Image (cartoon, rainbow, N blue to C red):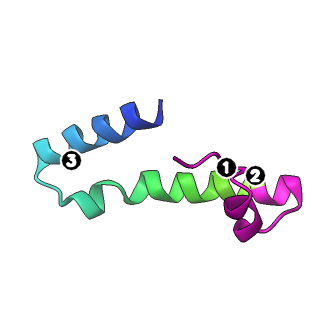
Amino acid sequence: AWRLLYRAQDGWSAERGHPPLLAHLGTSLVERAMIDAYCRGTGQSFATAVRENNLEID
């Protein structure tokens, strides 16, 4: 689902002539908020979540 959103955002921004960095600002803020909520909800730091692969980042 995340990759579909990323591709859709790419297409939307390209049609309007927006630079890619600006196009993905909103999605990156949502991603950051989701990671923060996960870490707060589980009581762990971001470093721990990444080190233990709790976020299952590819």
The numbered mark at residue 38 is 2
Quarter assignment of residue 52:
bottom right
Foreground: disc 2 or disc 3: 2
Q: On residue 13, which mark appears?
A: 3
Locate residue 27, reporting x and y percent.
44, 51
For the residues carrying marks 3 and 1, which lies nearer the camera in this image? 1
Element under disc 1: loop
Task: Decide which of 45, 53 is in the foreground and name it.
Answer: 53
SS assignment at label 2: helix
What secondary structure is found at the residue carrying circle 3?
helix
Residue at the front extreme, as displayed: 52
Say whether disc 2 or disc 1 marks the residue closer to the N-terminus: 2
Q: Which amino acid does label 1 sit on?
A: Leu
Neighbor class of circle 1 (other Cα within 10 Å; few <14, some 14-19, many 20+) is some
In the image: residue 31, left or right of residue 18: right
Which mark is nearer the camera, 2 or 1?
A: 1
Horizontal relation, residue 13 to residue 56: left or right:
left
Which sits in the foreground, 53 or 44?
53
Residue under label 1, please give it: 55
Do callouts 2 and 1 mark residues in contact (Cβ within 8 Å)?
yes
The answer to whether mark 3 and mark 1 are in CB contact below 8 A is no
Q: Do residues under tags 2 and 3 come within 8 Å of each other at their CB atoms?
A: no
